[in-house]
Image: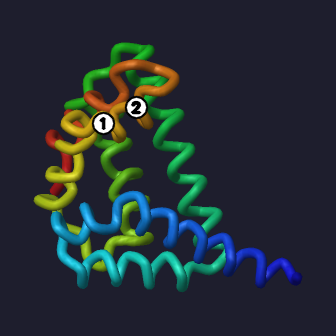
Amino acid sequence: MQDSEKFEGLKQNLVEENERRYGAEARERYGAAAVDEGNRRMLRMSERDYDAWRGLEEEIRAALEAAVRGGADPAGTEGARVCELHRRWLSYTWPAYSAEAHRGLAETYVADERFTAYYDRDVPGCAAWLRAAILAHAR
């Protein structure tokens, strides 16, 4: 199997796993059209875009952990920077950005224990800090 085939298989597996775990819930919350378009965007990602998307994810996590450890104010400049990183990360899979949808997603980071566990896995408080940053800065 060539590397390009492996990469296409990786993306397909990610979409299938996401559909299996969260598909029905996401379709109920955001609508089938939005979920389908997000899946299409994932499947159309180039390796370069995929690497950039994953890199942003890691950059966001590192920035969150540093901000929480350092006691940074999510309403301050670091909160604005992290919110922008998160917006850029979303733009890889969201069909269109809206601040309202961004703020709604941020609410789930503290309301849904799965999201909280993801963001807080190494440093407790990251999910709440990200939510506060997005609420303060999403435009």
Residue 9 lies, in percent from the top left, at: 68, 77
> Which residue bears the numbered disc 1?
130
> Which residue bears the numbered disc 2?
117
Marks 2, 1: nearer the viewer: 2
Relative placement, left or right, of 133 versus 60 is left
At label 1, the amino acid type is: Leu
Residue 80 lies, in percent from the top left, at: 29, 42
Residue at image point 34% right, 82% down? 36
Comparing 73 with 121, the one in front is: 121
At label 2, the amino acid type is: Ala
SS under mark 2: helix
Quarter of the image containing the C terminus? bottom left
Residue 72 lies, in percent from the top left, at: 33, 20
Residue at image point 34% right, 33% down? 116
Marking on residue 45: none
Q: Quadrant of residue 115?
A: top left
Query: What is the residue that sits farthest to the left in this orientation?
Result: 100
Q: Quadrant of residue 25?
A: bottom left
Comparing 57 with 115, the one in front is: 115
Q: Is residue 136 shown above or below 19?
A: above
Relative placement, left or right, of 34 versus 49 is left
Relative placement, left or right, of 62 versus 90 is right
Rate crowding at label 1 as few (under 14), some (14 to 19) or many (20 or more) other CA atoms within 10 Å: many
Rate crowding at label 2 as few (under 14), some (14 to 19) or many (20 or more) other CA atoms within 10 Å: some
Q: Is residue 102 shown above or below 4?
A: above
Residue at image point 53% right, 81% down? 43
* Mark 2 / mark 1, whichever is N-terminal: 2
